[in-house]
Image (tube, grey):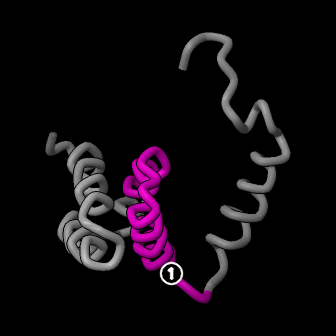
Amino acid sequence: MAKGKQTVYEFIPKLGQLRDDVLFGDVWEHPDLSKRDRSLATVAILAALYRTDEMRGHMRRALDNGVTETELKGLITHVAFYAGWPCAVNAGRIAMEVCGKE
């Protein structure tokens, strides 16, 4: 990050508070789904919506939450048929980057 450059969460503190308290503090901690399953769902949704920047962090989180590289590949292949080929190829590129395969 460039010196002095604000993050969006510094620029809009309420957004950061909601992310921390509600999304990661409540939704991600709710026991109805495991963090691993939430990660799979989140990556699939981000891939389907072509949300490249957000996908990087969530793929890393998915790996930290126990999702394997093989499972990410399977998820991306599955996404291709429900969200479209370009979404899957984009997700594949991000997965290569995150898994150190580029």
Please state, as top left, top right, bottom left or bottom right, where the N terminus lies in the image.
top right
List x then y, in percent, for residue 80.
Answer: 25, 71
User: Residue lying furthest bottom in this view?
Assistant: 32
Q: Is residue 14 magenta?
A: no
Q: Which residue is mark 1?
A: 34
Image label count: 1
List x then y, in percent, for residue 35.
Answer: 50, 73
**Left/right of residue 35 with respect to residue 25 in the rendered view:** left
Q: Is residue 35 magenta?
A: yes
List x then y, in percent, for residue 34.
Answer: 50, 81
The image quarter in which residue 91 lies = bottom left
In the foreground, 30 or 44: 44
In the foreground, 41 or 35: 41
User: Residue lying furthest top in this view?
Assistant: 3
Query: Given the image, on which type of amino acid does mark 1 rest?
Result: Ser
Residue 72 shows in this picture: no
- Identified at 39% across, 60% down, the residue is 64
**Left/right of residue 99 with respect to residue 47 in the rendered view:** left
What span is colored magenta in the figure? 32-60
In the foreground, 42 or 24: 42
- Identified at 30% across, 69% down, the residue is 84
